[in-house]
Each structure stands twice: as structure tokens, then as C-alpha cells.
Image: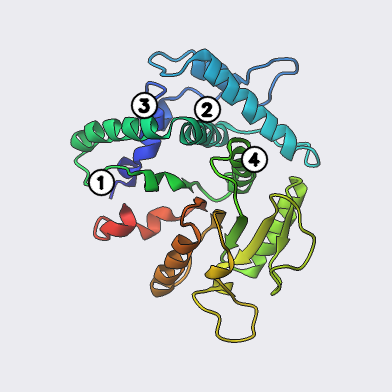
Amino acid sequence: MDMEKYLVLNKYFLSLFGVDDFRQLPLKNIQERIDDGDEITPFMKTLMSLKGIKFSKDDLLRYDQNIQEYVRKINRYRGNVVLKYFQYLPVLFTEIFLDQLKNNKVEFLNQLNEFLNQYRSENEIDISNFELKDLNKLAFWMATGSGKTLIMHINYLQFLKYRPFEPDNILLITPNEGLSRQHFDELQKSDIPCRIYDGNLNSGFQFKDEVLIIEITKLVDEKKDGGITLPVSAFEGRSLIFVDEGHKGKASEDRVWAARRAKLAENGFVFEYSATFGQILSERNKETLE
């Protein structure tokens, strides 16, 4: 199964730069550091030189400056993060997406469906048109070791910059306690306020835009005992949710967990990250594929 042909949003963003394949972008051998005193990253300089690009120079410069600002913020204590080309691109695509979601949602939806109509016939794929409710999730399929955690931190800053809505809750959902602790340490290094759910939703320091880290196994539909599980109904309002490898587990569990995530994400927004999306997708399972 050729999974790449189903990645419609990815293909749409590539088309905005005049290419139809990631490998056609001449970024791989570009020097990674940002030159001192230079207002434009080498990546953006190269992208702006491409033929068939569908952006104004001002928009591209604004996106690039925002990305540099995010990197400076997470480097306040880290001091050593420099984006590689395969990290810069998903961050740039997210920047475009959130800008359109906040400032041009209906026209953005129309443009996506115009692209999909042509793409669907050229690639013989059966995927229905985008609807407004489909614009509440971005999934990042990236190899282990490619820097998904840092991209997650930048995505957090991107969302808060554009604020398509004011989140009542910000959650990071993990598969297990070990990963929760790792994420807590990494978020602190990036100077992002966070805490791990310890059985008391109201315990600990409360910061604006604080990230609550919780394992998917501690979320339940309805609380039945005095343990540390938490019903999804505990999170009222609109939630911003980050999900790390949320599909890992038995297939029957996956369906239950997916339903709980969907309930949490109603009227909210989800960023999801995995190195193994391809392992759970098949053309025989139309619902999961779509």
C-alpha cells in the first residue's frame, strides 16, 4: 500500500511551493544554522526562489520570522536547537495551516477541496471532501529520532500565537508513565509550563497555558472508583490536545481510546505525533484511513 498518496494535506502544502513530492524541494544540503544578522533562514531563502510558489513575499517572511522566534523561545535554556530541513518544513506547514484556520477558514476549506478534487482523480483514491470539522487536527508522521518532541513544543507556541480559540484545557496525552516523565523534563527544558496528573486535577501550581500531562490509560468514560482515573467529562470547554503515540496498544483498546480522545477534542484542536502511523493504516479499514 502506497501510504504517501493518501496524505492529501501534505500534498496540498507541497503544491503551494510548486512541487508534488517532498524530495523535489532542494533543502537537504542547506546549511542548518541561521546566520547572525541575517533576517531570513537559508531554508526560506531557497523556498522563496522556487518557481510556481503561491505566496506573497511578505507572508513567507512573516512565517520565517515567527519560526525563528519560536526557536529562540525554546532555546532560552536549551541554547542549542537548530532546525533541520525535515523539521523546518512541518513547522512551516503548521504555520500556514494555523494562519489560514484563524484568518481565512472558509476560503482555506474551499482551496483544500479544489485541490482534493483534482488530486483524487489523478491518484484514484477514495477520500471524501474536507469539512470544517476536519480542520481541528494535524497529524505528524515522522521517524523515531527526527525531533517530534521539539516540533511539539513549537506547535504549542504556534497555536498560542494564532489562538484560533482560547483553550480552556491544554493536555498532553501519552501511552505510559515513563513517557509522561520524559515529556515533563523536555517541556521544562523548553520553558513551557507543565505538570503531570497525579490524581488531583487541581493540585500543583497553576500557570496560564499550562500543559497537563496524562496517560491515556488514566482517562475513562465514567469514574467508578476512588482511583486516579479521570473521566473525560472533567475537562469542560474547548481543549488543545497533544497526543504522543496515542494508538499504541491492542486494537480493541485503540478504538476505546480514540473515542475518548475524540470526546476530549470536541470543539477543540488536536496535534498528534507518531513514527508508526503506517503500521495501523490499511485500505481495508476505510474509517481509520480517512
* Residue closest to the eye, 167 or 29: 167
Q: Look at label 4 and name its amino acid.
A: Leu
Mark 1 residue type: Ile
Circle 4 crowding by C-alpha within 10 Å: few under 14, some 14–19, many from 20? many
Q: Quadrant of residue 71?
A: top right
**Residue where numbered disc 2 is placed:** 28
Q: Residues within 10 Å of mark 3 (few under 14, many from 20)?
A: some
Pick whichever of labels 2 and 1 is earlier in the sequence: 2
Q: 172 or 147, which is in the foreground?
A: 172
Measured Cα–Cα span from mark 3 to mark 2? 18 Å
Image position of 101 with respect to 240: above or below: above
Going by the numbered disc 3, the residue's amino acid type is Ser
Q: Position of residue 67 (x, y in %)?
A: 63, 30
**Label 3's element?**
helix
Residue at position x 56%, y 66% from top? 175
The residue pinned by badge 1 equals 127
Q: Earlier in the sequence, mark 3 or mark 1?
A: 3
Q: Of circles 3 and 2, which is in front?
A: 3
| First in sequence: mark 4 vs mark 2 | 2
Label 4 – label 2 distance at C-alpha = 25 Å
> Gap between marks 1 and 4, in whole Å?
31 Å
Query: Mark 1 or mark 4, which has the lower sequence index?
Result: 1
Q: Quadrant of residue 73?
A: top right
Q: Which residue is denoted by mark 3 in the rendering?
A: 15
> In this picture, is 258 found above or below 277?
below
Residue 122, percent from left and from top? 20, 33
Residue 262 against residue 167 in the figure, above or below: below
Pair 3/4: label in front: 4
- Say which mark, if any, is on residue 157: 4
Instruction: Give the structural element (helix, strand or loop) at label 4.
Output: helix
